[in-house]
Amino acid sequence: FFRKEEKFSLDKEFKKVIVPSCWQCFGYGDGGYTNDRYLFPLNPPEIGDSDYGVYRKHFDFNKKQGKRYYINFEGKDSCLYLYLNQKFVGFDSVAHCTSEFDITDFLNNGDNEIIVFVYRFSVGSYFECQDKFRLSGLFRDIYILERDEQHIESYKISYQKISDKDIEVSISFVGPKINKIIEVLHENLVINSDNDIVKFVILNAKLWNAEEPNLYTISIKCNDEVILCI
């Protein structure tokens, strides 16, 4: 843990902490509770200096051919800078959302060193003046996700009514042109396609409402990966 006036040094003694957690729980820095003001000087978009924590870990890893690897930080407060094997990977300042980085080209077969700088305040803190305790660190799970080299990067599901009872569903995909098997569970509807946009009709659809919260589950299979959408 470093105060804002301190310079980072790998020579400083690193102590073990539990991840996920907040560093105030281990006696580092100050917490705080507020719901109507900031805990730093108000001067948007500037944030000034901030206390920060540095996480450092060595781990063994063996890459597989035909795979890509993504590290996911499911929550940090407030922003992070990620380094892997002394190379800068990326930055993110959306505190309570997942930060995902493609680390395939940064990984070694064997020993790897990850260093994460987490700052207590960042420009994103201006969007977080809400009723909460102000705690810092990597407070949600962190994991490495293995995916096929050819995989879906993003998708969007939308629909429109084409009659009183029937709806047309449209799924748009971002990523390489690869074969996908799309199945609407409990509807006996299966589509095999490599198109960027896939459309189909559900007859006599049961739409969601407050009295009858009906939901449909769509399964998207691509290579060895299955994505379930409700």
Image: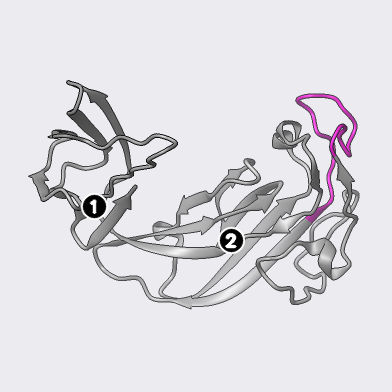
| Element on which disc 1 rests | strand
Q: x, y percentage for residue 67?
A: 29, 63
- Residue type highlighted by circle 2: Gln
| Residue 206 falls left or right of residue 74 | left
Residue range in magenta is 35-52
Q: x, y percentage for residue 122?
A: 74, 39
Crowd tier of the residue under label 2, counting other residues whose Cα lies within 10 Å: few below 14, some 14–19, many 20 or above: few
| Residue 108 falls left or right of residue 34 | left
Q: Mark 2 points at which residue?
A: 86
Q: In which quarter of the image is residue 87?
A: bottom right
Q: x, y percentage for residue 89?
A: 53, 51
Q: Say which mark, if any, is on residue 219.
A: 1
Q: Residue at x 34, y 47 (%)?
A: 230
Residue toward you, 129 or 106: 129
| Element on which disc 2 rests | loop
Q: Quadrant of residue 215?
A: top left
- Residue type highlighted by circle 1: Ser
Q: In which quarter of the image is residue 174?
A: top left
Crowd tier of the residue under label 1, counting other residues whose Cα lies within 10 Å: few below 14, some 14–19, many 20 or above: some
